[in-house]
Amino acid sequence: MPRLPRRSFLALATAAGLVAAIGAGVAFRERTRNELTVVNRSGRTITSLQVSLPWETLRFGPIAPGETVSRSFRIESDAHFAFAGELADGTRLRAEEGYITNGQYGEGVRIEVGPGGTLSFRQGRRGG
């Protein structure tokens, strides 16, 4: 088997190291990403839903019955979630739930919208 010239070997080793570093970075980011998931079990379309934190608002809608939608969010300080929205039949969705603290990462927040606009909230570490 022919030997690679030293320059080619160094280029190949550098490329392999770069690929490994990018892979590790992507895996770390995925593991530490915060995610909010909305599940529509209401039997009606969610025409709009806003999830507000002091530094950002996540907007969802429309969300069909049975559909699940997720978005990532940042944690910049201590805060709670404020939910406001509406079902297709005019039912209003409102709640203030949960609590996050600066320095948390990998948080998973799940809100299920049930019949009549009931809201069920769960929060915890993602993947754990």
Image (cartoon, grey):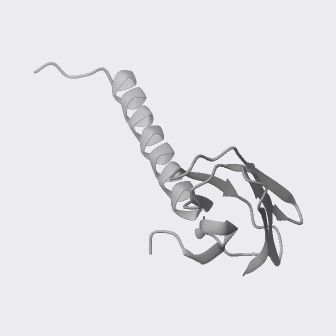
- Residue at 63% over, 70% down: 105
The one nearer the camera, 12 or 21, is: 21
As displayed, is residue 119 above or below residue 64? below
The x, y position of residue 16, in whole percent, is 39, 37
The x, y position of residue 124, in whole percent, is 57, 78
Q: Quadrant of residue 79?
A: bottom right
- Residue at 44% over, 35% down: 14
- Residue at 51% over, 62% down: 31
The x, y position of residue 65, in whole percent, is 55, 51
Quadrant (top left/top right/bottom left/bottom right) for the C terminus? bottom left
Q: Quadrant of residue 62?
A: top right
The one nearer the camera, 107 or 21, is: 107
Q: How many marks?
A: 0
- Extreme residue in the left direction: 1
As displayed, is residue 14 above or below residue 23? above
In the image, is 107 to the left or to the right of 126?
Answer: right
Quadrant (top left/top right/bottom left/bottom right) for the N terminus? top left
In the image, is 94 to the left or to the right of 105?
Answer: right
Q: Would residue 102 be seen by someone viewing this image from the given angle?
A: yes
- Extreme residue in the right direction: 54
Q: Would residue 100 be seen by someone viewing this image from the given angle?
A: no
As displayed, is residue 59 above or below residue 120? above
